[in-house]
Amino acid sequence: MTTKPTLSFWQIWNMCFGFLGIQFGFALQNANVSRIFQTLGAGVDDIPVLWIAAPLTGLIVQPIIGYLSDRTWTRLGRRRPYFLLGAILATLALLAMPNSPTLWIAAGLLWILDASINVSMEPFRAFVGDQLPTPQRPAGYAMQSFFIGAGSIVASVLPYVFAHFGIANTATAGAVPDTVKYSFYAGAAVLFGAIAWTVLSTREYPPEALHAFSDARPADEDASPTDSARSASTGLVWTLAGAIVAAVVWYLGIDKQLYLIAGMIAAYGLIQLVASARRGGFLVDVLADLRAMPAAMRQLAVVQFFSWFALFAMWLFATSAVTSVHYATRDAASAAYNEGANWVGVLFAAYNGFAAIAAILIPPMARRLGLRVTHLINLVLGGLGLLSFLVIRDPRWLLASMVGIGFAWASILAIPYALLADSVPAKKMGVYMGIFNFFIVIPQLCAASLLGFLLRTFFDGAPIGAFAIGGASLIVAGLCTLRVKEPA
């Protein structure tokens, strides 16, 4: 057994640089897609349903890409072919998105954009586990967080900057302003350029070398007949549970978006049933790995659920909350609405800027306080930042709220992966990172289906209520971190 070589700062820089482009695309999506939807005629109640495409795409794409990249070896390597493919597709989607003529085309392009970014992003997480020795992994994930913050700062603030230089920030009804269009065009160039830099400037260990390193944990055995029987019985239970939830929603006549929850439960059951009838292949292997997931992953699943539920609440309703409360308008064609929407971009840039600073501070915090306590502190800061939206009325003071949110964001992007990576077998790093992303995607799907119902039930439909829900969710996530075992 040999030990992985320690990489230099610039080697880590190059291998993580592609995340600058990935997050440039995500930041444009998060800050502007709700605005595009409203511009094309969507109501506030429609936004969660239209956003369902994004997390649903991740739920499907990430485990598939992780599974395939674990089994890939080409002249470009193991993970880099997927970096490049995702970059090409995401670039084309970014160019098309702001030119959507109708709402349904915009929703479809969101699906394509999110799928393409996920094709590139998922292998990047496994890439750090592949390339870095255990002591350097927290620094590698923190470097990714730094680039995420840096890319998001520029991407989020672009419409505001373009408006400052005289580019039209309003358009005729049903048309996307030029400030948003030019931002997406710039994002396409940055995304492709940054990922291409990582592809061209890095190399990968061949599989035989990777599995010979001392930190390569043995993979679990393949699925057995007992696993198939277990899949069948489990599948029946989940499918029945999904049918019962759907029946309750229908009988009580409550929010139709809750059918998504029923569908997710039933779909998981049906997948188990299909897998039980097969002796091998993707479904059987992934479900076997899901059942055999490390204890640390099970503990972190709860933390991730509440963390990403909160983030999705903010991304979904930031534009409608700030424009309705702090700019006193819901007219998507008005100057006040577009000014408020631009300010949301500035706020998103601010929290990503604070995240870039936090990414520098997290490694020494983790060394001094431990990973768990560091994550707890940062998530509580983020929860307080979201809750402060309910009491602040001057939009300029919302910049102070972004400090806590930025620290939470940097921590969410780094600490869980550092807690997890040492417990995952090297042979299955990709598929386990894909499975781990279930616990990012599922809470987003739950948010898309539940938030509209919760806002109408408890906040009279006011979008600002999403920040109350999100703030409480982040604090709960922080407390759940204390259940996670600290790695040696």
Image (cartoon, grey):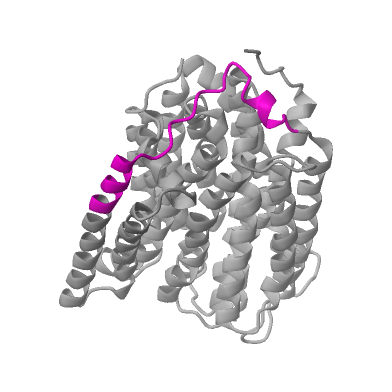
Compared to residue 227, the image places residue 3 above or below, namely above
* Residue depicted at 38% across the width and 54% down the height: 275
Query: Of residues 81 and 150, which is closer to you in this image?
Result: 81
User: Along the horizontal axis of the image, is 17 left or right of 174?
Assistant: right
Query: Of residues 130 and 374, which is closer to you in this image?
Result: 130
Give residue 485's position: percent from left, percent from top: 37, 23
Compared to residue 333, the image places residue 435 above or below, namely above
Residue 87: quadrant of the picture: bottom right
* Residue depicted at 66% across the width and 13% down the height: 2
Compared to residue 291, the image places residue 275 above or below, namely below
User: Along the horizontal axis of the image, is 376 left or right of 346?
Assistant: left
Q: Residue 159, can we see it?
A: yes
User: Where are the magenta residues, as a range?
Assistant: 204-233
* Residue depicted at 46% across the width and 33% down the height: 378
Give residue 392's position: percent from left, percent from top: 44, 53
* Quadrant occupied by the N terminus: top right
* Residue depicted at 28% across the width and 55% down the height: 235
Query: Of residues 47 and 354, which is closer to you in this image?
Result: 47
Instruction: Report if residue 457 lies within the magenta region.
Output: no
User: Along the horizontal axis of the image, is 343 left or right of 280?
Assistant: right
Give residue 214's position: percent from left, percent from top: 59, 16
Instruction: Report if residue 210 lies within the magenta region.
Output: yes
Q: Residue 439, can we see it?
A: no
